[in-house]
Amino acid sequence: MKLTMSVVVLVLVAASISSVAAATGPPSHPGKSGNQTTTTTATATTPAPPATLPAQAKAYGRYCQTQSKRHVAGQQGTPFSQCVTAMANTARGAMPKTACAALSKKHVAGEKGTPFSRCVVAAAQLHKSQQAQDSSDDA
């Protein structure tokens, strides 16, 4: 009986200490002792993002579906990831030839064209779809 009463008292003391600690919150300056609380108010507010994520999302990967997703030794990223980056640059106004310059111009056995040529074709498709979207927005 004495043992269970000691356990109950110990649990109640631990619960009351944790509730007091939770009520006061963490120390305002970790590493310093004392219960000094300071309040600060933020004067600058964080600006809201210009658009929601679905409005910002672009599916550049669909233009690069013909590119390989296997890593090529000696190159940074895969041809697919390089193509997606080139599509983003093209969408911002870069010329397809310069945007796709990082891709290889060597023919790969069993594939149509070079990664560079497929990227330029994809950039042309992107440009065409952007023009179609712009003309439908104007109407």
Image (cartoon, grey):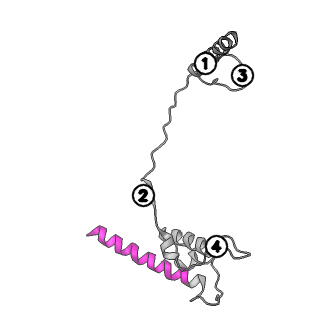
- Residue identifier under label 1: 15
Residue 62 image point, x, y percent: 48, 73
Bin the neighbour count of mark 3 within 10 Å (Cα to Cα): few under 14, some 14-19, many 20 and up: few
- Residue identifier under label 4: 78
Q: Is residue 42 left or right of residue 133?
A: right
Q: Is residue 27 above or below residue 127?
A: above
Q: Is residue 89 left or right of residue 28?
A: left
- Label 4, label 3: how many angstroms apart (C-alpha)? 50 Å
Bin the neighbour count of mark 2 within 10 Å (Cα to Cα): few under 14, some 14-19, many 20 and up: few
- Residue identifier under label 3: 32
- Label 4, label 1: how many angstroms apart (C-alpha)? 56 Å
- Quadrant containing the N terminus is top right
- Quadrant containing the C terminus is bottom left
Proximity of marks 4 and 3: CB atoms separated by less than 8 Å: no
**Image depth: mark 1 or mark 3 in front:** 1
Please, what secondary structure does the residue beneath circle 3 have?
loop
Q: Earlier in the sequence, mark 3 or mark 2?
A: 3
Q: Residue furthest front?
A: 1
Q: Which amino acid is tagged 4?
A: Thr
Quadrant in the picture for residue 38: top right
> Of 89 and 113, which appears nearest the observer?
113
Please, what secondary structure does the residue beneath circle 1 have?
helix
Q: Which amino acid is tagged 2?
A: Pro
Is residue 11 within the magenta segment? Answer: no
Which residue is painted at 74% across and 75% down in the image? 74
Q: Earlier in the sequence, mark 4 or mark 1?
A: 1
Q: Which amino acid is tagged 1?
A: Ala
Is residue 135 within the magenta segment? Answer: yes
Q: Is residue 4 above or below residue 78?
A: above
**Image depth: mark 1 or mark 2 in front:** 1
